Every structure is written in structure tokens, then in C-alpha cells.
Image (tube, rainbow, N blue to C red):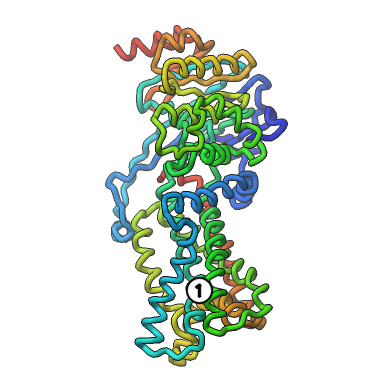
Amino acid sequence: MNSPTALNPTVKAALPPDAAILLEDVSVRYRVPSERINTFKEYMIRWIQRKIAKNDFWALHHVSLEVRKGEVFGLVGRNGAGKSTLLKVIAKVLRPTGGRVRVVGHVVPLLELGAGFHPELTGRENIYLNGAMLGYTRAQMDEKFTRIVDFSELGEFIEAPVRTYSSGMYARLGFAIAVDDQPDILIVDEILGVGDESFQRKCAARIDEYRVQGATILLVSHNANLVQQMCQRAAWLDHGELRAIGKPDEVLDHYHRSQA
Amino acid sequence: MANLNRSQTVYDSSERGFFALDELREVIRYRNLILQLTRRDIVARYKRSVLGIAWTMLNPLGMMLVLTVAFSQILRFDIPGYPAFVLSGLIAWNFFSQTTTAAMVNLVWGGALLRRIYIPRSAFALAAMGTGVVNVLLSLVPLLVIMLVVGRPIHLSLIFLPVPLLLLLMFSLGFGLIISTWAIYFPDVAEMYQIVLSAWMYLCPIIYTEEMLPAQLRYWLPLLNPMYGLIRLFRLPLYDGRFPTWPELWPSLLLSTAVLLIGWLVFCSKSDEFAYRT
């Protein structure tokens, strides 16, 4: 199940100097019980009867991939192809079942914006709470606070409980917290339905600004045009396996032919 | 994550030290998160109530009142300063029952967060302990008032209270981590635990004194119930107004340390799986 590198840490391949994200033979296995066993009692009965059947589900299967520093890299694939799992493995949320993931630099995942907001707390309180979840200290958050409020365009609503926010305001606040820092690696999910059109433009401008400053961008998208326009390279993921990697138009070509 | 020379930071999934120490290192790095989660627990609970933070003091007072009426008026227990006796035991018990429940519930129901972003898995349990300590400190106010009212003088031994509180915290954290791990796999553990708690409470010297127990129970109960000694220890500097003797202290010290270590090891050895399970 484990790759040789995971089993034998002495065989450490050196990290290529221009790599930002390096996946070596990465696999993620979910064990899905074939029947849902919810209670402890039920589990014990089954366990005694030796009747716990589990199906393995490989969300990622031997994926090797390198994203270079300063590159805009696109990731395409259908729903359930393993794109989210791949992002979670990079963002440290899931530890891979096998293989090795290495990430160089400060990662800002623009996913799950506003995850962990508490509805009863004010915008201000949630900025500090969310910042802490992203690993910032109190002093760092004091320094970032004004910029975040300005970018979110929430004005005096920042003192109101988040439960009174519209979904657009909610997303704007989440986005403002996430992009305040210059990242080394930015993970962007295309589903950035953040607020109205003008705010979306502002978000795109901010992402582009980071790209110009040399951030590595990993873009997940269904939108072929967007991938073709923005990315230098792309990869196609299907059923947890890497099916193609290379120039965006070639990868998209493969992808579209398989869909037809 | 956000240190100064962060362009050098490399996350390597295959680089693992000893899992229990890894988690400890992450907790120290994310200490601000634990503070913020504690703050969230306390602030959010009282945001929409009129009496606000006063409920933390009124809650054990109400329960004490009920127990006092039931046991000293109806069942005629003859314990001097009974309200103070009950309340001091109850504060310790509430700390244990509330923090362990919160550690478990926050992890099971807050588990969605663990699937979305990385935070140290033990942050929820640690924040529950923080909330518990704040609640104990607030409950001390009505306790000290009640002690004066029923004529139990406050002694210098009060300065010893941080020690039993720390032991209680260590035990609760260790135990909370064990049942949290269990509840991740079987959500009904959370329901079962409430029943266990209500039975467990009567096995602790909260409403009765040790002298009221039959001789056999008086021997076995402290051995089998770790909370027995911890509650007694918590009550000593308050209600009894004296420092503990060494034989009263060391069993709880040893036990709390052991439970914390076991709980931490169990939890950390499984914590990588949580994002897969919840």
C-alpha cells in the first residue's frame, strides 16, 4: 500500500529546486463500510460475527505530479474525479495513504471560504477566529485587520453578527481574510462566486497581482477557456488517476474527447 | 505557516516524528487558535441572553439549591454548611462533565471543519478545557459567598486550589480525548455518555460524605472511581479549609498524569484518520 519512499525514509529524493508542489506516487484510500454501521452495539455484534466488510475506494491512485514555482497550473476533471482530494492532500487536511507530498512555501487555499465562521459572532470577532484557524498570531491579525475590512467592503457591518450577513457579504469576508497575505502558492477553485460582479473583478485582479509577483497558482476548473487562457500547464484527473499532463490545449483535447 | 522565512517551509507528508510530539508542536504553534476557540465558546453562549455571563454562576447555584432542599430538608442529611459542601463538589463535577462532553461534541459536530482546513485535531478538546477553567473561576464567586453565608470561613488553603484544578483538568483532558476518539467512529457514544455521566455523578461524594457510605463501598469506591479522589481534593482547600495530606494527593496526581498520557497517545495515533471519518 505504501510507496517505497514512504516506507523507507532514507531514500529521500532531493526536492527539485524549482518545485513548488511535488507529489510522488500519491494514493488516498477511503474505506467505505459496505453497510452503514452506526452504533457501537451493532459494531460489536458484527465484529464478533466477523462480518465487517469494507470496500476500498481509491480517491487518488498513484498520482505523481510536479508544479513548478511561479507557474499557473490547471487541474481538470469531472465531479468525483479526485480533484478536491488532491487539493486536500496538498493543503495538509488529508495525510495520503501512500506516497509522498511535498509543498514548498506558504499555501493559501481559496477553498471553503469562511469555513468555521460562527454565526453569533461579529465580523470583527470572526476575522480573529478565522485568522487563528489559518495559523496567524493575535499580533499578526491586529496588523492585518484594517486591510481585511477595507478589502471586504463591509464597512460598519463588521460589528454586526455574521448571521445577519447576506451570502455575498459572507463570502467577501472569507475571501478578504484568505487573500490578505502574499502567498507562495495559491489554490483557486473556480467556484469563486464571491459577491457581485465588481467584487469578482476585484478578486480576479488580486489573484493576478499575486501571479505577477511570482506566486504559484493551482487552478481547479471546469471552464476550458479559463484553463486555456491562464495556465501554462494542466493535468486531467479521472477516477483518481492522472490521465494526461502537459500543455493545456493538449490536455483539454484528451479530456473533451473522453467526454464525447 | 506564517513565519518569517516561510519560503523555506516545506511540508513533507512522509516526514513524521513521533506522532504525539508532532501534535504537541502544532498545538504550541496554534496556541492563538485555542485561545480564540475558548473565547468563541464563552462569547457565543451568552450573546443572545439577557443575563449573559451571570448564567455561569446561576446555573450551579440553582442545582445546588435543588440538591440542598432534596437532601438536607427532605432526606435530613446532617452535614454542616451543606449548601457549601454540595456546591464545592458540584463545581468540580460540572467541570469534568462539561469539558469532556464539549470536547467530544465539538469534535464530532465540528468535524466538518477538520475535513476542510488543517487545524490541530486536539484544538477542540483543549479549548473545551479553557472554557471549563473560566467557568470554574466564575463559579467560585457564588461559592465563596455561600461559604460565608452558611458559616464556613475561607482559609488560606484557598491558594492551593490551582493544584486540584490542574489535576482535574489533566484527567478530564485525557478522558475527553479517549471518548472523543471513540465518538468519531461511533456517534452514539455521545448519547451513551450522558447516561453514564448521570450514574457516575452518584458514585462521587458530591451530595454525601464518605462517612455516610457503607464500609465496603468506602474502600472500593475511591479505588474504582478516579473522580472520587479528585472531587475530594478539590473540596479540601475550599469547604474543609485545609491543605491535603500527601496520601490524599499522590494517587490523584499519578492517575491524572497516566490518563492524560494515555488519552493523548490514543487520540494522536488516530487523529490522522479523523479527516477521513467525520
| Percent position of residue A126, x then y | 51, 39
Residue A250: where, in percent of width, then height?
Answer: 45, 8
Give the residue at mark 1: B227
Residue B271 horizontal side relative to residue B246, left or right: left
Picture residue at 56% right of the left edge, 60% below the top:
B134
The amino acid sitting under disc 1 is Met
Q: How many marks?
A: 1
Q: Chain of mark 1?
A: B
Q: Position of residue A58 (x, y in %)?
A: 40, 34
Q: In the displayed structure, would residue A226 be above or below residue B79?
A: above
Asked if residue B265 can be seen in this view, the reply is no
The relative height of residue A127 versus residue B79 in the rendered view (above or below) is: above
Along the line of sight, which residue is nearer the eye, A240 or B52? Answer: B52
Please state which of residues A208 and B8 is positioned toward the viewer in this rendering. A208
> Considering only vertical position in the picture, is B118 above or below A90?
below
Is A175 displayed left or right of B253 in the figure?
left
Report if residue B180 is visible in the image: yes
- Residue A22: x and y, percent? 58, 26
Q: Tell me the element at label 1.
A: helix
Which residue shows up at 42% across the image and 57% down it?
B182
* Picture quadrant where residue A80 is located: top left
Q: Quadrant of the C terminus of chain A?
A: top left
Q: Outermost residue, right direction? A: B5
Alpha-carbon neighbours of circle 1 within 10 Å: few (<14), some, or many (≥20)? many
